């Protein structure tokens, strides 16, 4: 308890220095080892997850918030787990260390930088904990609500690699992946390459669509490109102070993130891909369908990740 109070005080002081009234946001994630589908046919995979989902739940806070984070390692787990938030500035040894099955751990950090950040398990061997699915996205919205042009819709996409045998670390170290996935599924949002796919991303022509993109890796870089579109703006790390205009592709390395804005003047489809072709053609394609009939709820609120 004392530790938490001290950490809170330090975080509050950091925010006071920024002249920000800190709000405390409680976030709890539970490490769970479960079977999950990795394609549209329902092929199951022995995943390690946060809250039984890959990617884990989206954590969304505002710049200046104090995040009071609790990790629970479910008692059914067979492994120790941990959480590394890229949006945090803390002590790696104290805050990011592992807890055993049945244990829980709390730490606190100040969300001082706005952006689209990766979070992941850092327990040994980290390559396996991430590759099996222990990753997600924390979005820190800027405290200045006008820092970004307003997005009409937002989507989260996390890129990752599929290693056929989740117990084979040697294959992970040797980069012997078989598929590249968005949001934990092969061609999850691509009915063109997989007729079993039932989901796409949706928007209307003229709308500003913001893709919060994270590359969970574990090894491959992503050359993220909208086929038949142009990124109107790209914000490296998702920070509104980092802005690039009119890009065809932008490279996001393993463990990195960025926000991508796109606007289509016409109805029709764009295909969001990792333009490294052996990545795209093994699963890293997501259709963004622009239609005047787009579902008004898609890409808003809790629907910014299409499960
Ligand atoms: Cu883990």
Image: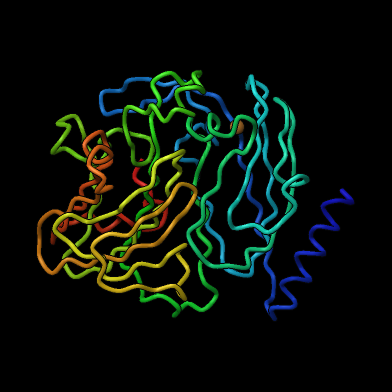
Q: Quadrant of residue 206?
A: bottom left
Q: Quadrant of residue 243?
A: bottom left
User: Residue farthest to the front?
Assistant: 174
Q: Nearer the viewer, residue 191 or 87?
A: 87
Left or right: 84 in relation to 195? right
Left or right: 30 in relation to 163? right
Residue 148 screen position, x and y as percent: 41, 75
Relative to residue 155, is residue 78 depicted above or below? above
The quarter of the picture showing ligand 1? top right
Residue 95 screen position, x and y as percent: 74, 47
Residue in the image at 60% along x and 50% along y? 85
Relative to residue 85, is residue 104 depicted above or below? above
Q: Nearer the viewer, residue 28 or 165?
A: 165
Q: Nearer the viewer, residue 278 or 211?
A: 278
Quarter occupied by the C terminus: top left
Residue 26 screen position, x and y as percent: 66, 53
Residue in the image at 57% along x and 28% along y? 32
Residue 218 screen position, x and y as percent: 46, 38
User: Residue farthest to the right?
Assistant: 2
Q: How is the image coloured?
A: rainbow
Residue in the image at 24% along x and 48% along y? 275
Residue in the image at 21% along x and 34% along y? 197
């Amino acid at each position: 308890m004392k530790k938490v109070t001290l950490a809170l005080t330090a975080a509050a002081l950091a925010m006071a220095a920024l002249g920000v009234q800190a709000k405390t946001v409680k976030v709890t994630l539970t490490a769970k080892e479960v079977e999950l589908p990795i394609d549209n046919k329902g092929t199951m995979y022995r995943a390690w997850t946060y809250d039984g989902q890959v990617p884990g739940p989206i954590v969304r806070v505002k710049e200046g918030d104090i995040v009071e984070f609790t990790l629970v390692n479910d008692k059914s787990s067979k492994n120790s787990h941990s959480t590394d938030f890229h949006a945090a500035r803390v002590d790696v040894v104290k805050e990011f260390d592992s807890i055993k099955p049945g244990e829980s751990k709390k730490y606190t950090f100040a969300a001082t930088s706005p952006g689209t950040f990766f979070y992941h398990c850092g327990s040994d061997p980290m390559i396996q904990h991430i590759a099996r699915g222990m990753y997600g996205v924390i979005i820190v919205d800027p405290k200045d609500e006008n820092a970004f042009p307003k997005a009409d819709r937002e989507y989260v996409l996390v890129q990752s690699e599929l290693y056929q045998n989740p117990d084979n670390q040697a294959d992970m170290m040797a980069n012997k992946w078989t598929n590249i996935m968005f949001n934990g599924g092969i061609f999850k949002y691509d009915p063109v390459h997989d007729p079993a796919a039932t989901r796409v991303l949706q928007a209307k022509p003229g709308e500003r669509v913001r893709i919060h993109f994270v590359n969970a890796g574990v090894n491959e870089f992503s050359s993220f490109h909208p086929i038949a579109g142009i990124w109107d703006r790209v914000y490296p790390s998702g920070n509104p102070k980092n802005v690039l205009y009119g890009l065809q592709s932008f490279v996001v390395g393993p463990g990195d993130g960025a926000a991508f804005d796109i606007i289509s003047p016409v109805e029709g489809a764009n295909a969001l891909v990792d333009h490294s072709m052996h990545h795209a053609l093994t699963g890293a394609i997501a259709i963004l369908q622009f239609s005047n009939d787009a579902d008004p709820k898609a890409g808003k609120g809790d629907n910014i990740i299409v499960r």
